[in-house]
Amino acid sequence: MNQEKQWLLGMRGASDEKDSSDLIAFDDHKIKFVVKYCRNKNVLDLGCVQHNPLNYKSKYWLHKAILKIAASVVGIDLYEKGVRYLRWQGFNVIMADAQCFDLGRTFDVIVAGDLIEHLENFHGFLESCKRHMGRSSKLLISTPNPWYWKNITKAVLEKEVANNPEHTCWLCPRTLRQLVKRHGLDLGEIVFGSRYMKDRLMPLPPALKHTSFHAEVVMKN
């Protein structure tokens, strides 16, 4: 593996066998948000390997959910071995860097599920996405919620809040809005979500009780 890619978890990333299923968790907060926009659309799925290619067996694998309802799907990922494995399994996946890619076409929807927090070059990412968007296209971004109550508790009690070792940043809806506006984009719908029932039942505002948020990014008028 190239020196600049040694930070990728790849097969060292967890693949939870208990989540393996031929079914799809359409009630999962991230999948529910994404498929609402992708039904019968031409979709580009960025970072589709989701660390470990064995995640293709999981009911939570976002790419599988998109394939089920979209008109067409192309996936890209930086993890070469993961891309090769998924292609061997029959998926239409291309090795490419989400911070600099050009497929020579546009898509109705571009999905970046839990990807942006892994990146260093936001400019390259957003400009690459714009290159593949028409005026009515959507870019869907999911990312961890920095104001999640557990993160706040850890920040009070510890020097650092531990997270995925691939992550480079935290973004909240306000900073994401300010970031995309610099590239002629804007936020539409914003939805907070958590997979854990205990979070969903907590008597807290959505921006505090949920692990993640999902944002619809659109072209500015």
Image (tube, grey):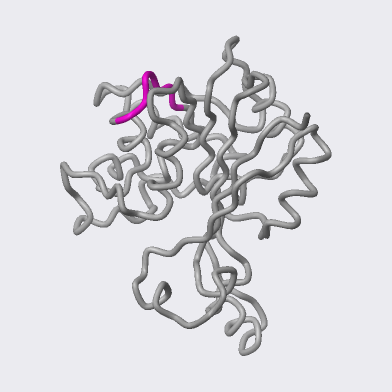
How far across and down, in percent of the image, does residue 165 sit?
54, 59
Nearest the viewer among 151 and 220 is 220
Residue lying farthest to the right in this orientation: 182
Locate the C terminus by quadrant: top right
**213 sits left or right of 58 in the view:** right
- For residue 190, above or below residue 208: above
Residue found 50% across the figure and 66% down from its top: 211
- For residue 21, above or below residue 185: below
Nearest the viewer among 5 and 162 is 162
How far across and down, in percent of the image, does residue 152 sit?
61, 80
Residue lying farthest to the left in this orientation: 22
Q: Which span is picked out in magenta?
A: 69-75
Number of numbered callouts drawn: 0
Residue 48 falls inside the magenta stretch: no
Residue lying farthest to the top in this orientation: 104
How far across and down, in percent of the image, does residue 189 sit?
60, 47
Residue found 80% across the figure and 34% down from its top: 183
**184 sits left or right of 205 in the view:** right
**140 sits left or right of 34 in the view:** right
How far across and down, in percent of the image, does residue 159 sit?
67, 82
- For residue 200, above or below residue 167: below
Displayed quadrant of residue 17: bottom left
Displayed quadrant of residue 128: top right
Residue 72 falls inside the magenta stretch: yes
Residue found 73% across the figure and 40% down from its top: 186
Residue found 44% across the figure and 30% down from its top: 80
Residue lying farthest to the front in this orientation: 221
- For residue 4, above or below residue 190: above
